[in-house]
Structures are given as structure tokens and as C-alpha cells.
Image (tube, rainbow, N blue to C red):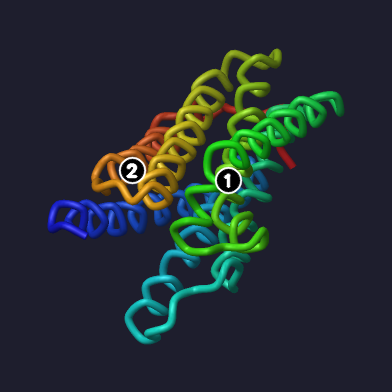
Amino acid sequence: MDIISQIFQTIGFLFSLVVLAFLWRRAFRPSEIRTFWVLLASAWTFGMLGTIVWIVHDLTIETELGAFSIIDLFYVLRYVLLGYVLWLYPAPLSRRAWLWVGGAMLAANVFARAVYFEPAVALIGSDWVDFWGQVMYLILDVGIIALAWLRVRAPRPASWNRYVLLLFCAMLSYGAANTINLTEYIFSLSGGTLQNVLWMLTDVFALILVLRIDPQIGKSNEE
């Protein structure tokens, strides 16, 4: 990894901590709908914990991570919480939305199999389990982006417009970063900078969401 990528990773990690602090600060403000903010802050927390465990592993253990590990549990929980937030607020989407999300994830499966399987086998001699461990996040990202887009298309109070658009941009940025990272790894391409910029941009969208969102958002959903 070159020095520029290392710098971006360090800055991105520190910036994520700042965003996380703001999210939890918002979550504990009694004037806000706590469930929404707690879920969002928890999702970012699980992502951060996954990153921390990954860093500790790389610094202390010489063996590489397997196709699936405890780290994946943290990241998957992040997706689950984000999916719940996007489905529930400001009002639950229809059940038909899950058909669109499932269809998008199925299409991502087909795409991943067609594009990444043979290069992955050539690179690491992976079997099917190893392969799906590599492309799992691409598929999850497509599902989350599809859900965020359905949220953008759904009717909502005007006070939620900024929330919806910023979360969609955050999910799109994060998914693009993961896809670029996967592609560079599978095809042994040089790089590492663009995905770090996009991961950081995800936190930028989250910070704008926390700092600029209408304080009256979701009054009708208050607990």
C-alpha cells in the first residue's frame, strides 16, 4: 500500500470517529426521535468496530483472515441496521419494496459470478465459499442502495428530503468504494486512493445529515 493510501486511511479513520461522536450526541438529545438516531449511530458503530478488529488482527496475527470471520459479523450488522432505518423512516415502505431489493441482489449475484469468479479462482484458488466471502459485500451494497433509492422515490414529508437524499448518497458512495476495492483486489490492479476518498465521503454525507437536518424532522413519529 502506498503512502497516499495510508494517509487517506488514517484521516478517514479519525474522521469516522468524529462522525460517530456526533451521531451518538444526536441520539441522546431528547428533542429528536431517538430510535432513528440510535439505529443510525449503532450502524456506524458496528462498522467502526469491524474496522478496529480488522486493524488489530493485521497488527497482531500473521495469518490472513478466512472467507468469513468475526469481523464480518460487525459489518453485516451494520447493513441490517441501515436496512431497517431505510425501510422504517419516515414511514414503512410497502412489502413490495423487498421484491425490488431482492431482485437487485439477485442481479448482483449473477453479475459477480460472471465478472469476478474466474479471476478470483486464478488469484487465490478460491472455492465457492471463498468466492462468496469476497463478493458478499458487493451484493449487500446493491441491496442497500436499491432500498435507499426506493426510499428516495417514496412519498414523504418535505422535512425528510435532506435525510433521504443524504443517506442515499452515503450508501451509493460506500457501495462504490467497496466495489472499486474488490475490483482492484481481484484483478490485481494498483490504486487504493479512490475507494478511501469515497469511504471518507460516506462519512461526510453522514456528518452533514447530523449537523444540518431539520430539528423538526419526524415529529409525527416521535415516541
Taking depth in this image into account, of 71 and 45 the one nearest to the observer is: 71
| First reached walking from the N terminus: tag 1 or tag 2 | 1
Q: Is residue 218 visible?
A: no
Give residue 105's quadrant in the image: top right
In depth, the one of 186 and 170 nearer the eye is: 186
- Percent of width and height locating residue 34: 63, 47
Please, what secondary structure does the residue beneath circle 2 have? Answer: helix
Q: Which mark is residue 195?
A: 2
| Residue 162 showing in the rendered view | yes
Q: Hey, which residue is sitting farthest right in the picture?
A: 95
Q: Secondary structure at mark 1?
A: helix
Marks 1 and 2, Cα distance to the nearest angstrom? 26 Å
User: Whole-percent x and y of residue 69?
Assistant: 59, 72
Kind of residue sitting beneath label 1:
Trp
- The reply to whether dot 1 and dot 2 touch (C-beta < 8 Å) is no
Residue at 26% of width from left, 56% of height from top? 9
**Quadrant occupied by the C terminus:** top right
Give x and y (percent) for residue 139: 62, 42
**Residue for point 67% across, 39% down:** 109
Q: Is residue 209 above or below residue 134?
A: above
Residue at the extreme left of the image, as rendered = 3
Query: Residue visible at 56% across and 27% down?
Result: 216
Residue at 22 percent of width and 60 percent of height: 1
Depth order, front residue of 129/214: 129
Residue named by callout 1: 37
At label 2, the amino acid type is Gln
Residue 89 quadrant: top right
Between disc 1 and disc 2, the foreground one is 2
